[in-house]
Image (cartoon, helix red, strand yellow):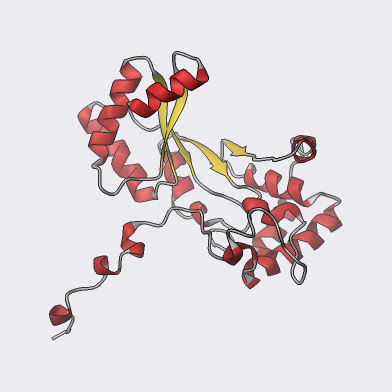
Amino acid sequence: MRAVESSLRRLQTDHIDLYHIHRPDPDTDIEETLSALTDLVRSGKVRTIGTSTFPAAEIVEAQWVAERRGLERFRTEQPPYSIVNRIIEREVLPVTQRYGMGTLVWSPLAQGLLTGRIRKGLPNRTHRSESMPVHFDHDGKLAVVEQLVELADQAGLRMTHLAMAFAVSHPGVTSAIIGPRTMDQLDDLLAGAEVTLGDDLLDQIDKIAPPGTEAGPNNVAYTPPAVLDPSLRRRPTAERSAA
């Protein structure tokens, strides 16, 4: 509630059109979260609500809780999605399509990896690569980038236009969020807004980066407690025997 009030003051407005929950909170029951968000909607301060980087199972749970408790339901999901990070094609996108949710994907350029400026064997120094070296120096990802650079050249496209057009070609994707840092970057992205990819080109991308897979680790994606906390996936030592 305090965060919304602060946002309204900073934005100098009386409502927020779309309010996203930034990653799940494993310590808070989803019913409590939806109840608070419902109060915000019914008070007129928020018009609709969404999630960000929620696993498919938690999206489904939230939809069920909203229906059973008469609460506002999440209308959108905001996951990472790019040619090198296609994991949401397995479950998240089918689930959001099933529930009629809008999907606003972020990082379609993979934090700059798909701009064509970061190449295998070259010094890759950017404001992002300094803080996430595993993401930018991963051999699997760089191998995909090299093939995509060649594919984009053959198609007569800029790498940025190829990557953005790919992200919005999926029927479950509503929009792709861009993050230009300079006017030149913005102009480039806007120039590719009308680029569309044919089936032949999408088939070639599928061969380079197969559907539903990740070319390498995505350090900025949500990692659930079941993966982060070893105690959640290990029985007490005395109970580990199969006998």
Picture residue at 63% right of the left edge, 41% below the top: 168
Which image quarter: residue 61?
Answer: top left
Estimate the x, y position of residue 193 in percent, counting from the top left.
74, 36
Estimate the x, y position of residue 191 in percent, counting from the top left.
80, 36
Estimate the x, y position of residue 69 in percent, counting from the top left.
21, 30
- Judge left or right: residue 100 versus residue 203: left
- Judge left or right: residue 159 versus residue 54: right
Q: Is residue 194 above or below residue 109?
A: above
For the N terminus, the image quarter is top left
Q: Is residue 42 above or below residue 242?
A: above
Q: Is residue 128 above or below residue 16?
A: below
Q: Is residue 8 visible?
A: yes
Estimate the x, y position of residue 204 in percent, counting from the top left.
72, 60
Picture residue at 74% right of the left edge, 52% below the top: 115
Which image quarter: residue 226?
Answer: bottom left
Front one among 8 and 156: 8
